[in-house]
Each structure stands twice: as structure tokens, then as C-alpha cells.
Image: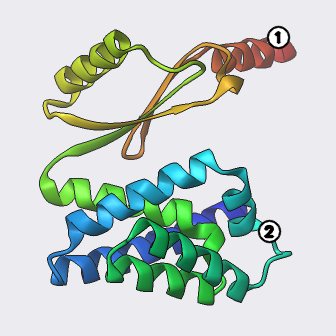
Amino acid sequence: MADDSKASNVGGRYAQALFDLANEQNQVRAVEADLKSLKAAIADSKDLRTLLVSPAFSAEDKRKGLAAISAKARFSPTTQKFLGLVAANGRASALPEAIAGFERLAAAARGAVSAEVVTALPLSSAQAKGVAAALRQALGKDPEITTRVDPSLLGGIKVKVGSRLFDASLRSKLDSLKFALKRA
């Protein structure tokens, strides 16, 4: 658990530094778009996830891999330099946390609320609209929703807004039941 909090803390510091730099250069939207593309690539590519976290790859290997992706995707120079720095400092494994942190900072700067919705199966467009409407009513603001599929939930939904988590997943309910049965 301590390792996870360290990674999150490191990711948060990198996110803040990148946000401050992008803000100074009026590049927040461009960097945010680049990071959104990179986030999708990380989610879609097991090889990229392995490159980022595996100690079998050197910091230089990670830097070269991220530089190739940056060039191919035509990321802004700010994003390219950031990715090079993260890799050179041996912090490539903290990149997902840094991306999430940057997204939160950018959303807050726009006055928007970001929410992560995790479900066992992909949401239909009607379900996504329903979730967005419920969040809009609960938060009083239009949410910027990112969705993720996690089959281990078995069913239901998890919604995270800032530090608040609403967990109505079947997995959570089964875990609660298992805990209650152990105590009985």
C-alpha cells in the first residue's frame, strides 16, 4: 500500500509541475488532449503498460519508447519534454497517476467537475446519459466523465468524484456480505 501512495504522490507532483508549465505557456488544452491520447494508448496497449512499469526496461528505453509515441502522435513540445523528463527520472510508472492529476487540475481550472465511472460492462449511450444527468443533479455542475470497464466488479457501478467514491458494485456488496458472515 505504501508504494501506491508514493506513486500517487509522485504522480501528483509531476501533474502539478506540468499543469503550471502548460498554464504559463497557454498550452493546457493542447497538453490535456495529448495526455488524453496517451491515456487511451496506455489503456489499449499491454506492451506500453509493461514498458512503463517493468524494471526490465531502462529509463533510456522508456524515454525512447515515449519519445517515439510522442513523435508519432505529434504531441506538443511541452508534452514531449514532460514525457522525456518523467522517463529520464525513472518515474514512467507514475505516468497514469500524473495524467489523472493533470486532468483534475485542468478540469478544476475550467470550473468543471471530473468524474470517473467504472462499470463491469461498457455503458450504452442511454446509460451514459443517465449517469451524466444523475451526476449533474447531484453535483450542480456538468461533469466531465471518463469511463472505464473493470470486469472484476461483476456488476453495478463505481463513481469517483474527487476524493468521494460511490460504490454500488456487486463485488463490493459481496465483499461486505463475506465480511459480515465472518464476523457472525
Count of numbered marks: 2
Q: Which mark is residue 181?
A: 1
The N terminus lies in quadrant: bottom right
Mark 2 lies on a secondary structure that is loop
Q: Which mark is residue 132?
A: none
Instruction: Answer above or below: position of 90 versus 123.
Output: below
Mark 1 lies on a secondary structure that is helix
Closer to the observer: label 1 or label 2? 2
Drawn side of residue 115 relative to residue 25, left or right: right
Drawn side of residue 8 relative to residue 78, left or right: right
Instruction: Answer above or below: position of 159 versus 16.
Output: above
Q: Residue at x 58, y 47 (%)?
A: 43
Q: Are the residues flagged by discs 1 and 2 in contact, CB closer than 8 Å? A: no
The answer to whether residue 100 is visible is no
Q: Badge 1: how crowded within 10 Å, few (<14), some, or many (20+)? A: few
Percent coordinates x, y for residue 111 in the rendering = 13, 51
Q: Which mark is residue 54?
A: 2
Q: Residue at x 29, y 13 (%)?
A: 130
Percent coordinates x, y for residue 113 in the rendering = 24, 43
The C terminus lies in quadrant: top right
The answer to whether residue 128 is visible is yes
Name the residue type under label 1: Leu
Q: Residue at x 32, y 76 (%)?
A: 76
Drawn side of residue 182 relative to residue 69, left or right: right
Name the residue type under label 2: Ser
Q: CA distance from mark 1 to mark 2?
A: 39 Å
Percent coordinates x, y for residue 2 in the rendering = 71, 64
Residue 14 or residue 41, whichever sits in front: 41
Indicate the quadrant where residue 27 lies: bottom left
Drawn side of residue 153 relative to residue 183, left or right: left
